[in-house]
Image (cartoon, grey):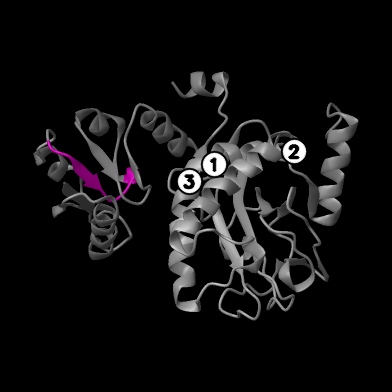
């Protein structure tokens, strides 16, 4: 499962990687070294192979458009795999903070 | 403000605001039994089978947290049952569109154990939203030092009863000197659309009773 973390968050990248690796360990998923998103945008995400499972540090890194591109996506902080309810959760988080 | 609430709901809300908590029988004793049964089964696999009454169990200190965490992991699937313990009371006190903590916490307070103490505190001082309540449910009868306290008094509470409390009220526990182990569960609830603090929607809370109008609004 390919890791996906971001330099745009306040949480240090190495801490994000610890959380992502721990998620994979707890759920028995193989972990493949993370790609790190730049502070400026989401260019690293668009270079990812979306046909393969991805484990992102958090839902906060994602938009619905990005979600729609993924075949299988997990969020480590939220301890969840995206499903049909995830877009609704993203909208709720957007209005509630 | 509560003009349209029923007399019973107003009385419940006034008690909660005045005392800081309400203690009631659980609304579904069968649901509580259904929470306890798999927890006992798993515990029997982890420590000994047949399992004695929970209040007589004493677990080695070095194993306590691992066992507690294993049981907490299994409790995730029992959240719907846990909600049904207090569905109507939560609706009256908190609201009809709720967010529920994604984990049910388990507390094991063994006699003389000082490793699991939470001294007097207010969760709202450490990043919890004042809009949250805690549904606290004992799995063993407990009183005095085996129980928890609010401000200046202990809560006497039995299996089959529940406590819903305001985290902004000072509360805690002391060393259990009662000669039996207290087992209890706790989980937070809040109005889905009330302000969040340190514990966020998604990673800590999950919507559990969102209504059609809200879904339509979000679509």
| SS label for mark 2 | helix
Q: Residue at x 47, y 69 (%)?
A: B65
Query: Could you tell whether B59 is left or right of A40 in the image?
Result: right
Q: CA–CA distance between discs 3 and 2?
A: 22 Å
Location of residue A85 with respect to B152 vertically, above or below: above
* Residue B1 among those drawn in magenta: no
Q: Residue A62: give x, y in percent of width and height.
A: 29, 40
Determine the chain carrying the residue at label 2.
B
Circle 2 residue: B89
Say which quadrant the C terminus of chain B sits in.
Answer: top left
| Tag 3 and tag 1, C-beta contact below 8 Å | yes
Same chain for the residues under marks 3 and 2 in the image: yes
* Residue A55 among those drawn in magenta: yes
Q: Residue A66: give x, y in percent of width and height.
A: 23, 33
Q: CA–CA distance between discs 3 and 1?
A: 6 Å
Q: Residue B106: give x, y in percent of width and height.
A: 56, 58
Determine the chain carrying the residue at label 1.
B
Say if residue B204 shows up in the picture: no
Q: Which residues are magenta?
A: A52-60
Query: Could you tell whether A14 is left or right of B58 in the image?
Result: left
Q: Which mark is residue B76?
A: 3
Q: Residue A23: give x, y in percent of width and height.
A: 29, 54
Say which quadrant the N terminus of chain B sits in.
Answer: top right
Q: Which mark is residue B79?
A: 1
Q: Nearer the viewer, mark 2 or mark 1?
A: 1
């Amino acid at each position: 499962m390919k890791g996906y973390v971001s330099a745009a968050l306040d949480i240090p990248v190495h801490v994000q990687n610890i959380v992502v690796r721990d998620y994979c360990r707890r759920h028995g998923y193989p972990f493949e070294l993370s790609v790190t998103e730049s502070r400026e945008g989401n260019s690293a995400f668009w270079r990812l192979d979306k046909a393969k499972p991805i484990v992102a540090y958090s839902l906060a890194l994602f938009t619905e458009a990005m979600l729609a591109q993924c075949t299988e996506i997990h969020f480590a902080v939220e301890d969840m795999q995206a499903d049909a309810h995830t877009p609704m959760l993203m909208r709720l988080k957007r209005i509630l903070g | 403000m509560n003009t349209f609430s029923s007399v019973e709901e107003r009385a419940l809300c006034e008690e909660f605001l005045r005392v800081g908590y309400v203690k009631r029988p659980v609304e579904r004793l069968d649901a509580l039994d259904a929470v306890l049964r798999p927890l006992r089964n798993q515990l029997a696999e982890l420590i000994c089978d047949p399992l004695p009454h929970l209040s007589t169990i004493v677990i080695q200190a070095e194993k306590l947290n691992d066992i507690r965490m294993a049981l907490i992991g299994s409790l995730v699937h029992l959240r719907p049952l846990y909600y049904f313990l207090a569905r109507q009371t939560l609706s009256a006190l908190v609201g009809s569109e709720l967010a529920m903590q994604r984990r049910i916490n388990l507390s094991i307070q063994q006699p003389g154990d000082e490793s699991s103490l939470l001294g007097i505190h207010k969760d709202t001082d450490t990043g919890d939203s004042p809009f949250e309540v805690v549904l606290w449910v004992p799995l063993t009868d407990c009183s005095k030092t085996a129980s928890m306290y609010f401000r200046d008094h202990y809560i006497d509470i039995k299996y089959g009863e529940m406590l819903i409390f305001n985290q902004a009220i000072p509360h805690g526990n002391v060393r259990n000197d009662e000669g039996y182990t207290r087992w209890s569960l706790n989980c937070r609830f809040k109005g889905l659309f009330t302000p969040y603090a340190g514990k966020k929607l998604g990673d800590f809370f999950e919507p559990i009773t969102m209504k059609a109008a809200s879904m339509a609004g979000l679509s």
